[in-house]
Amino acid sequence: MKVRALQYVVLVGVAAVFVGPLYWLVSTAFKQPAEIYQWPPSWWPDHLTWENFALAWKAAPFDRFFVNSTVITVAGTALKVTNAVLTAYAFAYLRFPGKKVLFFLVLGAMMVPGHVTLLPNYLTVATLGWINTYAGLIIPGIGSAFATFLMRQHFLTLPSEVTDAAAVDGAGHLRTLWRVVLPMSRPMLVTVVVITAVEEWNNFVWPLIVTNTASMRTLPVGLLILKDEEGLANWGTIMAGTLLVLAPMLVIFLIAQRYIVGGITQGALKG
């Protein structure tokens, strides 16, 4: 009993470390300025106020930021996941020269920090005239070594008898992928989609570099603009803006969480 009680105490402590800042963010977003700075601190506002959200929405063009982030997240996720699925299928089921070498190169790409490619990508986008465009924001990031690795590892865990039966029935590779492989890979596919969507939604450095007008900025960059507008004196407005950015991905994660745990571990040990 003592060991179990200690385990619960540790779990509660770990949960507090992660949930505490999120709770403070949400409560501050609904507080009036006087409650934010009072001591001892107020753990929950006496009177909920929506004024901080209105101020945040007016301080920066969040409507445009939401449109840009939505377009980039939807298009970027669709292209990145499609690319990962097709590439992973080729590595899992097709035979071609240099297959293992190419896969090791993909694994090597996972070891390269993303910031290393910022300058080459920017020079390429500038040469193509894609600065401050959706193409410049989306196209350079449609390749994902991590998503390809996850999908390939999962495909290798599927029973070969199913794909062999599809081949005997005359199904081509695209039909086998669409009708057989993907329906059996739903947990992993949902996991990859959620991970990719969160990555696209939260991307900050690349949109900051490749855009130069407020009309093309995304929500993470919009938070920087909001902080510059409000300074460090109006934390209620800043927290409200942060909650606006956080809420969509948090909802998506909560909806898809039952797929993620199973999907992220499937095929992890398969070579």
Image (tube, helix red, strand yellow):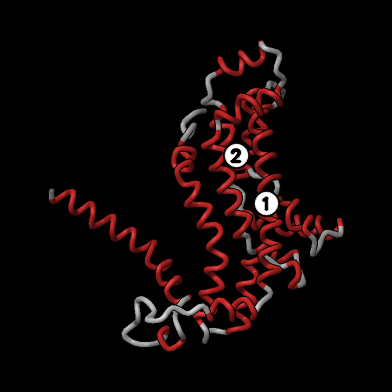
Using the image, determine if residue 80 lies above or below residue 232: above
| Residue 185 sits above or below residue 118 on the image | above
Q: In this view, does 1 lie above or below 91?
A: below
Left or right, 99 with reference to 212: left
Residue visible at 56% across and 68% down in the picture: 244
For the residues labelled 2 and 1, the Cα–Cα distance comes to: 26 Å
In the displayed structure, does residue 140 sit left or right of residue 112? right
In the figure, residue 221 lies in which quadrant? Answer: bottom right
Query: Does the CB distance between marks 2 and 1 fall below 8 Å?
Result: no
In front: label 2 or label 1: 1
Disc 2 residue type (three-letter): Leu
* 236 lies above or below 129: below
Judging by the rendered image, the residue that carries numbered circle 2 is 107
Could you say which disc has been placed on residue 74 in the image?
1
Crowding around mark 1 (Cα neighbors within 10 Å: few <14, some 14 to 19, many 20+) is some
Quick one: label 2 or label 1, which is nearer the N terminus?
1
Q: Residue 82's mark? A: none
Residue type at mark 1 is Val
Q: Percent position (x, y) of residue 68?
A: 71, 62
* Residue 253 position within the rendered picture, expressed as x and y whole percent measured from the top left: 50, 52
Q: Residue 210 appears in which quarter of the rendering? A: bottom right
Task: State the residue at coordinates (52%, 28%).
Answer: 271
Q: What element carries label 2?
A: helix
Give the quadrant of residue 119.
Answer: bottom right
Q: Residue at x 23, y 51 (%)?
A: 7
- Crowding at mark 2 (Cα within 10 Å: few <14, some 14-19, many 20+): some
Rendered residue at 75%/67% (across/down): 216
Secondary structure under tag 1 reads: helix
Residue 34 at x, y percent in the picture: 43, 89
